[in-house]
Image (cartoon, grey):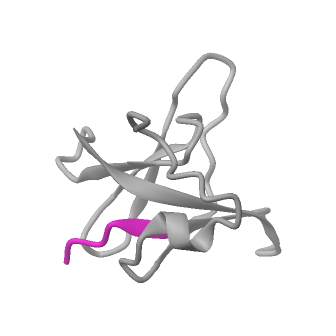
Amino acid sequence: MNTLRYELVFSDGAGSARDVVTVERTLSTGPGGHPVYSDRTGIIRAEISDRGEVRVLPSGGHQEPSQSVVARPLPDADPADADPEGDPGPGPRP
């Protein structure tokens, strides 16, 4: 499955959802050989396997690896359609 976008749900040890971040597929692959996904800022980066296993990748110093992350696939729609400000996300600007 070649999912282009996921919602990453970060939760605490009790399973309560704390943060939800949308990530998009990049051209990179992670240490496990699976695609790397990134949020618009590039701060949240995660390798997601075809079975939905998530490995959060550090993008800078002083980050603690997150243990409770679930990836939920999103429809492969144009991400600009979902953003009310029309921001196309990461990448070169026209």
**Horizontal and vertical percent position of residue 56:** 49, 46
The C terminus is located in which quarter? top left
Residue extending farthest to the bottom is: 75
Q: Is residue 39 left or right of residue 19?
A: left
Q: Is residue 41 left or right of residue 4?
A: right
**Horizontal and vertical percent position of residue 82:** 59, 72
**Horizontal and vertical percent position of residue 52:** 37, 72
Residue extending farthest to the top is: 61
> What secondary structure is the magenta-colored segment mainly?
loop
Q: Is residue 15 above or below residue 94?
A: below
Camera-side residue of 1 and 53: 1
Q: Is residue 75 above or below residue 52?
A: below
Check if residue 94 falls in the magenta segment.
no
Q: At x 43% / y 36%, what residue is drawn?
A: 93
The N terminus is located in which quarter? bottom left
Q: How many marks?
A: 0
Q: Which residues are magenta?
A: 1-6
Q: At x 27% / y 41%, what residue is drawn?
A: 30
Camera-side residue of 41 and 88: 88
Q: Is residue 86 left or right of residue 79?
A: right
Q: Is residue 27 left or right of residue 93?
A: left
Q: At x 54% / y 48%, what residue is drawn?
A: 39
Camera-side residue of 31 and 81: 81
Task: Tell me where residue 51 sits by quadrant.
Answer: bottom left
Q: At x 66% / y 34%, what residue is drawn?
A: 64
